[in-house]
């Protein structure tokens, strides 16, 4: 268990990530398997009033915020509510739990994070505040760290499912070309392999997922700017990913949703830029959300952009995009395994 008192958000993030790192080396859990849907958080409240008053509204404002870049409105997390008196052993198996505790004896707001307390894999966060007003005032200070914590837990669970089928021909080609490890589950295949470029696809009747890897020599930090990332990505998308009709091609677009960038710190590299937005097929009607990560490979001084995209017209896309996000987060530069270990 890790206890985190009222501190700046950076300290909260460091504390949460340190907890994750410390627990990562533990032996396999013998707890019962957790339950719950992907991107769902079970909020345990003390009474029905908390769900509808400022406490519930504040939680929904942040955890239920619309995820940026999706074609239909979808929240970051689906929120389910339960009162503490109904919080039975069955509900304690849920994968993501947020426990609200208003206790007048508390001196200040305190946030505690638990891993695999009642089931595995599981992430529990408990917030104790002296009053409702204290909770409402303090929750925004912790919201980003809580979202990061639950997002990391979701990625970890997704990779647990994907990892067993990842030793395949796709991984072999990625290792040979870019000298890095990445978890690519069964069902994906290499659609195009060109100098400094690879297009990996998964095509099923209901949807499409794709991963694009772009590499070029690193020159200066300007290559991390939004304009540079978009220009470099669009250059290669136009050249290597044509549409179905002549003169059409894939591109990042800002016609309806402007690409949004931010620096992230819990990636394989020390410095990485996340970009979210929308792609389309120029001169056609196809499109969907994407997420990309741009970073420098420290072993060969190459700047890479890995982009994951989803095509699922008129359907929900958040969880499909979250899968690609998890895959990209699995990038590892340490000692890629030789070709001989890969299943042919």
Image (tube, helix red, strand yellow):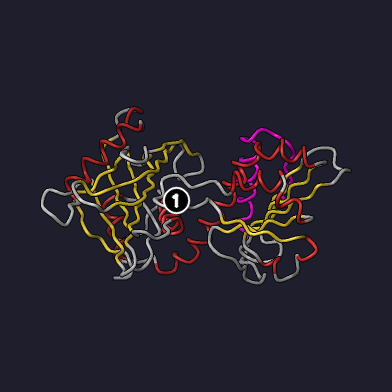
Task: Establish if 189 lies above or below 334.
Answer: below
Direction from residue 221 to residue 269 in the image, left or right: right
- Find residue 51 and report its horizontal and vertical position in percent: 71, 52
Q: Any magenta on residue 3?
A: yes
Report which residue position mark 1 lands on.
329
Residue at (84% x, 46% y) in the render: 103
> Residue furthest toward the left?
246
Quadrant of the image containing the C terminus: bottom left
Q: Nearer the viewer, residue 79 or 237?
A: 79
Task: Establish if 221 lies above or below 344.
Answer: above
> Residue furthest toward the right?
105
- Find residue 198 and report its horizontal and vertical position in percent: 25, 52
Q: Any magenta on residue 97?
A: no
Residue at (28% x, 64% y) in the render: 189
Q: Main secondary structure of the magenta part?
A: helix
**Residues packed near mark 1 inside 10 Å, few (<14), some (14 to 19) or many (20 plus):** many
The stretch in magenta equals: 1-26
Q: Nearer the viewer, residue 255 or 5?
A: 255
Disc tally is 1
Occupied quadrant, residue 229: top left
Residue at (72% x, 42% y) in the render: 4
- Find residue 225 and report its horizontal and vertical position in percent: 35, 30
- Find residue 271 and report its horizontal and vertical position in percent: 44, 36
Disc 1 secondary structure class: helix
Direction from residue 42 to residue 103 in the image, left or right: right
Q: Nearer the viewer, residue 138 or 119?
A: 138
């Amino acid at each position: 268990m890790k206890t985190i008192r009222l501190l700046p958000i950076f300290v909260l993030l460091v504390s949460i990530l340190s907890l994750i790192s410390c627990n990562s080396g533990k032996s396999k859990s013998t707890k019962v398997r957790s339950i719950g849907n992907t991107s769902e958080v079970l909020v345990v409240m003390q009474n029905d009033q908390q769900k509808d008053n400022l406490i519930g509204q504040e939680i929904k404002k942040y955890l239920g915020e619309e995820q940026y870049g999706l074609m239909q409105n979808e929240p970051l997390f689906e929120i389910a509510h339960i009162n503490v008196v109904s919080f039975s052993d069955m509900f304690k198996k849920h994968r993501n739990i947020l426990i609200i505790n208003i206790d007048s004896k508390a001196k200040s707001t305190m946030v505690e994070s638990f891993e695999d307390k009642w089931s595995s894999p599981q992430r529990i966060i408990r917030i104790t505040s002296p009053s409702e007003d204290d909770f409402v005032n303090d929750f925004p200070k912790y919201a980003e760290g809580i979202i990061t914590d639950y997002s990391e837990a979701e990625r970890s669970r997704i990779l647990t499912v994907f990892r067993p089928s990842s030793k395949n021909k796709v991984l072999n080609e990625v290792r040979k070309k870019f000298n890095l490890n990445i978890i690519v589950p069964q069902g994906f295949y290499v659609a195009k392999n060109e100098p400094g470029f690879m297009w990996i696809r998964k095509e099923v009747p209901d949807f499409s997922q794709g991963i694009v890897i772009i590499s070029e020599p690193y020159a200066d930090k300007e290559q991390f700017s939004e304009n540079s990332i978009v220009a470099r990505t669009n250059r290669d998308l136009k050249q290597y990913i044509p549409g179905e009709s002549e003169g059409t091609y894939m591109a990042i677009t800002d016609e309806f949703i402007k690409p949004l960038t931010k620096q992230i710190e819990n990636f394989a590299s020390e410095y990485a830029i996340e970009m979210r937005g929308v792609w389309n097929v120029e001169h056609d009607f196809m499109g969907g959300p994407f997420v990309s990560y741009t970073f420098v490979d420290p072993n060969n001084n190459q700047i890479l952009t890995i982009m994951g995209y989803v095509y699922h017209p008129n359907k929900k896309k958040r969880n499909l995009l979250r899968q690609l996000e998890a895959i990209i987060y699995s990038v590892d530069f340490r000692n890629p395994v030789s070709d001989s270990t890969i299943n042919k």
